[in-house]
Amino acid sequence: QVQLQQWGAGLLKASETLSLTCAVYGGSFSGYYWSWIRQPPGKGLEWIGEINHSGSSNYNPSLKSRVTILVDTSKNQFSLKLRSVTAADTAVYYCASMSLDNWFDPWGQGTLVTVSS
Amino acid sequence: QSVLTQPPSASGTPGQRVTISCSGGSSNIGSNTVNWYRQLPGTAPKLLIYSNTQRPSGVPDRFSGSKSGTSASLAISGLQSEDEADYYCAAWDDSLNGVLFGGGTKLTVL
């Protein structure tokens, strides 16, 4: 039973870099895509991007210029960096495992990241 | 950015059957499978239906999914108070080369 646990800084100032890490427990790290998804307060879900165990990544075009997703197979972890954040990046950020048929299961517990100006 | 269109709200009384629609286009629902997620207040979304019609283990058969052309639907029968939640559809989009989510539907059990 795969479980995801995520952590990272919850309060940032505008122009700083958001940094989150997600650890994968209890399952195979290969054979899946590892994803990040965010949800602004009171709003819907937005896919940020994904990476596989070999480091092949894919990003949402709307965020591509500011996003980097990395994988550390030695620790079964993957991470998200979002540069030059603004108040519009305030959201709950989730990590999730994405199957080859593109469904997300399971999800991490979520991290609220607040960007102050 | 959402191009998967869901009604913002839906409601029903206990025991009723409700359906939530998800409308897309040829680059997403029309050519890829649809997945549904349920999000209880203050919690992470959870997979409810995958590959249009499949239920993960532990999901009651009161929940069912269907897809036709560029639209999909989630049906909940025997509505229960604990079904109050936000429901999201999602599908891979070939133009985006990524996953698109619907805007979400807030289900209220009256």
Image (spheres, rainbow, N blue to C red):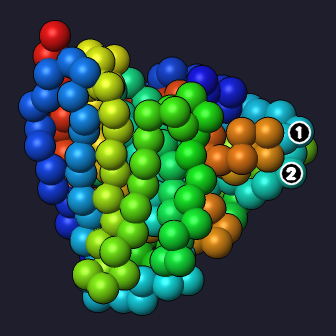
Residue B80 is left or right of residue A21, and the answer is right
Q: Quadrant of the N terminus of chain A?
A: bottom left
Residue beneath the point at 62% across and 47% down: B99
Disc 1: host chain: B
Residue at the disc numbered 1: B26
**Residue A7 at what x, y percent from top left?**
15, 56
Q: Please tell me whether residue A10 is drawn above or below residue A77 in the rendered image.
A: above
For the residues labelled 2 and 1, the Cα–Cα distance comes to: 6 Å
Q: Please tell me whether residue A86 is drawn above or below residue A37 in the rendered image.
A: above
Foreground pick, B18 / A117: A117
Dot 2: what SS?
loop
Residue beneath the point at 42% across and 89% down: A28
- Can you see residue B8? yes
Q: Quadrant of the C terminus of chain A?
A: top left
Residue A82 is left or right of residue B24, and the answer is left
Foreground pick, B54 / A91: A91
**Residue B59 at what x, y percent from top left?**
45, 69
**Residue A59 at what x, y percent from top left?**
56, 46
**Residue B3 at what x, y percent from top left?**
68, 27
The image shows a total of numbered marks equal to 2
Which dot marks residue A104?
none
Q: Which quadrant would residue A9 be assigned to in this image?
A: top left
Disc 2: host chain: B
Q: Amino acid at mark 2?
A: Ser
Q: Which quadrant would residue B89 be assigned to in this image?
A: top right
- Mark 1 neighbour class, 10 Å CA radius: few under 14, some 14 to 19, many 20 or more: some
Q: Please tell me whether residue B37 is drawn above or below residue B104 in the rendered image.
A: below
Dot 1: what SS?
loop
Residue at the disc numbered 2: B31
Choose the circle earlier in sequence order: 2 or 1: 1
- Can you see residue B75? no
Q: Amino acid at mark 1?
A: Ser
